Structures are given as C-alpha cells and as structure tokens.
C-alpha cells in the first residue's frame, strides 16, 4: 500500500513528465498506467494526480498573465523608444543635419508610404470589399486609387494617406 507522500511524489513526477516531454502525453499515459498497476487505491492515486494537474494549470495561468503583462510593457517601451529616435532625428534635421544616417554601427532611413483610409464604407465599390466583415481589400484598393490618380479621378469612399516610416537596423 502506497503512502500519501508516495502518491503525491508520484503525481508530481507524472505532471513533470508532461513538461519534460514538451507536452507529449505518451510518457504521461504510460507512467499513469504504471502508477495504477502499483497502487491499491487507484481512485486516490488519480485524485492526487488531478490535484497536481490543477495546481500546475493554475501556476501556468499566473505565469501566462505575468508574461502577457511583460510583453505589453516591452511593446510600449519599444514604441516609446522608436518615437524618441524619430524625434531625435527630426531635431537633428531641424539643426541642419541629415535625417538619414548610415555608418558602420547603424543606419536610419526615412521613406514615405501610403495607406488606404476608408472614409465611408457604403461608397466603396464592391470589388474592393472583403465580403465577410465588410472590410476593404486595401492592396487592391491602393492599386486602384493610384491608377485613378493618374487619370485625375477618385475612387468613391477611399483616399490614400501618406505616412512617414523610419527603417533602422543595427549592423
């Protein structure tokens, strides 16, 4: 007959086998069958494993929340630093320096880009809409807007918005 301590230890080892096998349940299933063969009170053994699984799931959920909060903080910091670099380059440009930098440590380039802005979805021709959620196929719409602009025409409900992007990389 197994003691509670032994059942708890075996339950912990079973749950750990899931982590060790990167989520593969085959080792867990085999170990669970082995445990059930060795103990007299199979129900108690299963309950100990269930309790350990529940605790592990709760721990993982706490860790997941912490990681999500950490990721969001990092995304905000990344955006803030990106804005700061853009502001520094714009300030340098105002002082007569080039916005673009290309040296042996890093490079910064600025280029215009355009993005489709939907003014009134009801006016957008059907060919540019994505059927399921009343979305606009922006790639198709952009090509049509550019073609229409060459002929001094407009595409109803759409216009191009010019944005400034900054590309940079550490060499």
Image (tube, rainbow, N blue to C red):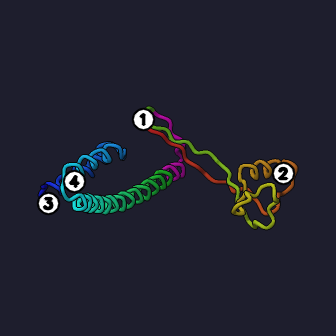
- Of callouts 4 and 2, which one flags the residue occurring earlier in the amino acid sequence? 4
Q: CA distance from mark 3 to mark 4?
A: 12 Å
Among the 4 quarters of the image, the one containing residue 106: top left
Q: Which residue is mark 2?
A: 148
What label does residue 105 carry, if any?
1
Magenta span includes 114: no
- Frontmost of labels 4 and 2 is 4
Q: Is residue 162 left or right of residue 49?
A: right
The stretch in magenta equals 89-103
- Frontmost of labels 1 and 4 is 4
- Of callouts 1 and 2, which one flags the residue occurring earlier in the amino acid sequence? 1
Q: CA distance from mark 3 to mark 2?
A: 78 Å
- Of callouts 1 and 4, which one flags the residue occurring earlier in the amino acid sequence? 4
- Of callouts 3 and 4, which one flags the residue occurring earlier in the amino acid sequence? 3
- Element under disc 2: helix
Magenta span includes 97: yes
- Element under disc 1: loop
What label does residue 12 carry, if any?
4
What label does residue 161 carry, if any?
none
Q: Are marks 1 and 4 in contact (CB under 8 Å)?
A: no
Task: Kindly identify the residue that appears in the image at 30 percent across and 62 percent down.
Answer: 54
């Amino acid at each position: 007959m197994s003691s509670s301590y032994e059942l708890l230890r075996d339950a912990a080892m079973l749950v750990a086998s899931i982590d060790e096998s990167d989520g593969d349940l085959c080792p867990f299933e085999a170990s669970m069958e082995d445990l059930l063969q060795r103990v007299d009170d199979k129900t108690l053994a299963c309950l100990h494993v269930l309790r350990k699984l529940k605790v592990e799931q709760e721990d993982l959920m706490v860790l997941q929340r912490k990681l999500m909060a950490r990721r969001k903080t990092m995304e905000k910091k990344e955006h803030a630093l990106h804005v700061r670099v853009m502001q520094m380059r714009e300030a340098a440009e105002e002082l007569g320096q080039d916005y673009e930098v290309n040296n042996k440590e890093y490079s910064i380039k600025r280029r215009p880009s355009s993005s489709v802005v939907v003014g009134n979805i009801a006016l957008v021709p059907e060919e540019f809409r994505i059927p399921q959620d009343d979305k606009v196929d922006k790639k198709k719409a952009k090509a049509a807007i550019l073609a229409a602009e060459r002929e001094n025409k407009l595409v109803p409900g759409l216009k191009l918005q010019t944005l400034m992007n900054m590309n940079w990389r550490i060499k």
